[in-house]
Each structure stands twice: as C-alpha cells, then as structure tokens.
Amino acid sequence: MSHAMELPKQRLDGDDIDDDGRPRRTGTAWTASAHIITTVLGSGVLSLAWGVAQLGWVGGPAVMTLFAAVIYYTSTLLADCYRSGDPVSGPRNRTYMAAVRATLGGSKVKLCGAIQFANLFGIGIGITIAAAASMRAIKRAGCFHEEGHKSECRSPIAPYIAIYGIMEIAFSQIPGLDSMSWLSTLATVMSFTYSSIGIGLGVAQIIANGGIKGTITGVAVGISAAGTSVTAMQKLWRGLQAFGNMAFAYGFSIDTLKAASPSEAKVMKKATAVSVAATTVIYLLCGCVGYAAFGDGVKDNLLTGFGFYEPFWLLDVANACVAVHLVGTYQVITQPIFAYVELRAAAAWPDSAFVATKEVTLWPTRLRVAVCPLRLTWLTAYVCVTTAVSMSMPFFGSVVGLIGAISFWPLTVYFPVEMYMAQHRLPRGSTKWLFLQALSAVCLIDHTLEGLDT
C-alpha cells in the first residue's frame, strides 16, 4: 500500500490484468522488502548519530528500537486493511488513500490527503537541503585538503540549492521517471554506499581515538565535552528533536505490493518484518558508530559536518552518492503530486490544449520531444517553490525533525489504528481497543511535544 495519492485505474487486456482490472501483481515478499528498504533508507540516517548524542547510549538505541517496533506493528495493522471486507476476496485498496476512503470515508479522506500532500512537500524540502549540503561538502572537502583542516573554507549553500532545483526541473519533465526500475536499483546502491562509508569512517575514527566516546545519558547539562554550554531546557528540546529525527528516518508505510500470493496481508507483513529489521540494523550502526566516534560533539549530518577530513576523496564519493540518490528520491516523492494535479486538470478540461501533450522540434536540432504545457509550467513552479523554501530554512537537522514530528503520528499510527478498529469492528472497551487507543494517545503526545520543539 502506498502513500501516493490515488490515481485512476489502468485497464489492460489478457493475462496482464488482475481480478480488479489493474496490472497483475508479480512481486514477492523479497522484492517488496527491497523496495521498502530503498524508499526508507535515505538521508535521514545521517542525522541519527546526533540524535543518539542527545539521548545517550541507553536512550538513543532504545528509542530507535521502540520506533522500529511501533512502525512494524502499525504496518501490520495497515496490511490487514489492504482488502475491504473479506481478507482474501474483498475489494483491494491499492493506495493508502483508497484504504482510508473504503474504511473511514467522509472528512477523514480529505484530512488524510491534506496531510499526505503536506508531508510529501516537506520531504521534498528536506531532500533539497540534504542534497545541496552534500554538494557543498564536496567543495569544502577539497578546500580542507588543500588549505588545511583549520581553514574556514566557507561556502554558502544557496547556490547549491539553486543548482539542485534546476536539475530537478529537468528530471521532472520525464514522465514515469519514478516507476523506472533502474532508478530503484540506483537508489539502493547509492544509499548502501554512503551508509557503509559513514560507518567505515566512524570505525576508523574510533580506532584513531583509542576508544569509544559518549556517555550513558548523552549531552550533559552545563559545559559539554564539545565545549558548548547546554541548559536544562536546551537538553529537553534537543531530546525532542532527536525523537523527530528518528521518526523521520522511520516514517514509512507499506509500499505498493504486486505479489501473486492469495493472501497479500501475510506477504506484506513478512516484507515489513524483513525491511524494518534490515533498516534498524543500519540505523543502529550509523547512529551508534557516529556517536562512539565523536561523542557529544557529533554534527547533525555525519558526512557534511566534517568530523571526517581524510581520506577526502572517500568523503567526496559518499557525498556524491547522497546527491545522486536524492535526485531520484525527490522524483519518487513528488511525482505522485505531479500526476494527481495533471489528472485532475485533464478531467476538468479534457479539450484544452494546455493539458494536451504535443511533439515539438528542438531548434537548432531535429530532435522531437513530447511537451505538455501544464506539466512544463506546473512542475517548474512546484520545484521553484520547494527550492525557495529550502533557501529560507537551510538547516538539515531542524527540517528533518520538523517533518518527522508532523507526519509520524497521523500517517504511521492514527490512520492505521483507526482503519483496523473500524474494519474489524473492535468492541469499545475491549482489551485490544484499549491498547490501540493507548498506543495512539502516547504517540500523539510525543508528536505534539516534537512539534512544539521544532
């Protein structure tokens, strides 16, 4: 099940269609696991070391493990809502929005759509900032290598945000880019590469330090090991931001599954278990190794904060992988919004030349390309807005915490819990009903506190 906005059915003929007229599902639990890992494992992993530093050796790993448990449990609830009514033969809900419409209906459908749109918009901003920071870090790494580690090597981030925005405008004009299989493969390779480099450099730093840094409770009130003053209130707010960062890293629902199994829910649950376990191991490694290497002084982005200086070329490779990965991730995140608006416009003005696709010849060449005036203007405007907002708030850690704080509870906890209770008609006051309500309430409190902090 995907967080993408609902799109119209695609009708096919013959053996290529499923029992609901959609393309036949051909995947397995393992391909679904790989797809979820590709979607989830992103730049949020780079902020986890800072999060562990705020919570300490006990709190940091414990909170990450707790988020993993919550996301797994609520995803299994969501899996049970893949079909309405009969779990084997009932109508399929191919998207998150379809499940909300079939199970809850009414105003909650509009609420869910608004939250999804805001979440995808926010993630686009976070991705833009992270990619620009990595692009800038490549230049700064070369500067530090040539001029020495004590050199300031200042470089404004705004030009890199603009460059990234121009790249995304170009890529956004390619229809169906988000569904191309090579993009998923490339993203997987890039994300595992920079995560592995970050872990490897952290281990090397631990060896160079001659031991592990960090404390049981994390950054202490007073003068920290990094030489900065931390008040009790700052300690509290930083801890809440760390919760938001971890929520951002874990913020996903079950993605679209194209499995041939008669019981999709079982396949989804298996895929969720595998993907959550794999990402949690990587998250714990990145967060704990980064904290062990730099202690309380760890930066909010492990690769761009320059705790590492050498080998500078390896740092460049890692940051280049981040930038390449996020170019594709931006398209995967925003293409559903693009498609939603285009389909709405086509339905409203079917005979308008503005929404029609036409072939034009690129002067002075003879190359012919398909151009849609709506796509050209709407997508360009959307990317320009996310780019402009990114320039106004270019703080990676804060943006990541804000997105995690806003989106985690409603999309990951509230709607799956409400849909499960409605579909299974849980008696009010029953043990499971009370447990699910308590889980949602606790996550809401955490969500509210994180939002106040960010």
Image (tube, rainbow, N blue to C red):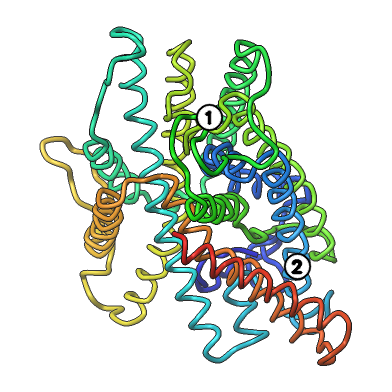
Q: Give the residue number, with chain letter if any, for mark 1.
A: 225
| Type of amino acid at the residue the image marks with label 2 | Ala
Q: Quadrant of the C terminus?
A: bottom left
Specify the quadrant that holds the N terminus: bottom right
Left or right, 132 with reference to 360 = right
Q: CA distance from mark 1 to mark 2?
A: 46 Å
Q: Position of residue 86 (x, y in %)?
A: 83, 81
- Mark 2 nearby-residue class (10 Å; few <14, some 14–19, many ≥20): many
Q: Nearer the viewer, mark 1 or mark 2?
A: 1
Is 193 rendered above or below residue 121? Answer: above
Query: Is residue 187 left or right of 420 when viewed as pictured?
Result: left
Circle 1 SS class: loop
Q: In the current view of this chain or complex, which residue is farthest to the front?
A: 222
Q: Quick one: 181 or 431, which is closer to the camera?
A: 431
Q: Is residue 433 above or below residue 143?
A: below
**Residue pointed to by mark 2:** 79
Find residue 376 and name its label. Answer: none
Name the secondary structure under disc 2: helix
Residue 365, horizontal then vertical, whole percent: 16, 35
* First-in-chain label (1 vs 2): 2
